[in-house]
Amino acid sequence: MKTKSLYLYLVALACLLPFCSCSDDDDVVATPLTAPTLTAEEVGIHTLHFSWPAVPGATQYAYELRATDADAVQEGDVTNETAVYFYNLSDDTSYTLTVWAFAEYGGDKSTSQVSTLTASTLPRIRLAAPQPVVTEVGASISVTWEAVPHASRYSFECRDADSQVVQSGGTVSTKLFFTLEAGTYTVVLWAETDDWDYVRSEDATVSFTVEKKKLVYVAQGTFSFGGSSWQATISAYEGGTYSIASWYGTEGYDFNFRVGEDDAVTMPGYYNDGIYIYVPMSAEYTAYLYDDYSTIERNGSTVTLRFLEYYVDDWCSFTWEEPSAAAITVDDIVGSYNEASSGTDYYIWDWGSADYSFSYADNEVTVEKVDDTTVAVKGFYRVDETLTATLDAEARTLTFAAGQTFASWYTFAAESAVDAPVVGRIGADGSNTDAGLT
């Protein structure tokens, strides 16, 4: 009987043990960590910086960044730090950051609730608009402006009175030249940039009227280009502006350039990227002329335009004969002129001892007929007095006799001597150059 009792006890004990090991009184109850408190530390055009105080008991933090109006996660990860930095974001865009804290595995803490914070990147900065100024340069129109900070280039459209675009393009310089038919035009100009923090400027506009250009002469010339040569017609206009019609044999594609002081060559109205000047040859082809490598060479009446072209990789040229300036009459030169001159005040009793120098960049002078060989020049140096000059029709010169009283107490004379006459030469383009005015 004793053996049987012991067996029954062991069986009963075995039946009780499973219930003791599964008791709920022995489970660990984990409480959630405190949710992180988020702060947007820095906001930029393409950057955001968030931070939060360390959460007691947290071992790591998970984060996700979304554009506020999007479901997809743009950037997410796990970090031991209490700050996150985001770069290369879109400008002027709202973003929402979600962060939660992880607790130590098996401890008495569990993952926190999520915290969210929304912040927006700044809008990109608009470039300042250029401030174009129009100047008439002979038969060309010059449009210039001050460089715009952070601008990489400038684009433009030149529109006629009917708002039709007659020229367009871009340049890295701050000057444009236009050779246009008579009429009213508006140039629309704006600045562009490669700087990611900036956007193109607002449009700037400037309007002007082009008077009918005076044709000086027309001549035939010869191109030498990449081992080939051909004939073309060049037209010379007042003010040193030239146009070679259909220069590569395609109607409507002319080669325009201007020859300024010291025979300096500029290419009007063409796109200039700072390395090349893009001169269209046809709808399909463009010549790439190296900037600042175009020159004018003169040998008597023979004139040669030389330029260096990228694809040809050699000097190219256009050569023509400049006709001799024909004899003129007094009637040819009467009218209003713009005076651009400089001079020096000398003391008569101590010739060569300068008092002060002066110059005028924009002054209207009137030339009136006295007789067939004499003209009266009014308004010189902005003085309401008259000087007389004698015309040599064949030599195309105007001679101001020495000793003419000017502005009450001045004597108008050449720089060489107080009794030397002032001689001005009338160029083929109608300009009057007076050497050594004093």
Image: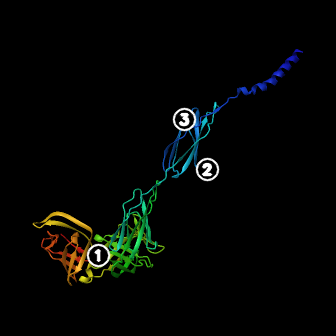
Crowding near the residue tagged with mark 2, few <14, some 14–19, many ≥20 C-alpha atoms within 10 Å? few
Image coordinates of residue 361 in percent, x first then y, are 27, 68
Determine whether 208 is above or below 37 in the image.
below
Percent of width and height locating residue 161: 43, 73
Disc 1 target residue: 298
Secondary structure state at the residue bearing disc 2:
loop
Seen in the image, is 422 located left or right of residue 255?
Answer: left
User: In the image, is 257 to the left or to the right of 359?
Assistant: right
Q: Report, in whole angstroms, how far the alpha carbon at label 3 lies from the one at label 1.
A: 82 Å
Q: Is residue 72 left or right of residue 197?
A: right
Q: Marks 2 and 1, how far apart in space?
A: 71 Å
- Residue at 55% x, 48% y is 95
- Which residue is most to the right? 1
Q: Considering only order in the chain, which callout, 2 or 3, is on the residue closer to the N terminus? A: 3
Local secondary structure at mark 1:
strand
Q: Amino acid at mark 1?
A: Arg
Whether residue 36 is visible to the viewer of this picture, yes or no, is yes
**Occupied quadrant, residue 341:** bottom left
Residue 328 in view in this figure: no
Foreground mark, 2 or 1, reads 2
Q: Tell me which colouring the rendered structure shows.
A: rainbow
Q: Residue type at mark 3?
A: Ala
Q: Which residue is mark 2?
A: 72
Three-letter code for the amino acid on which mark 2 is drawn: Ala
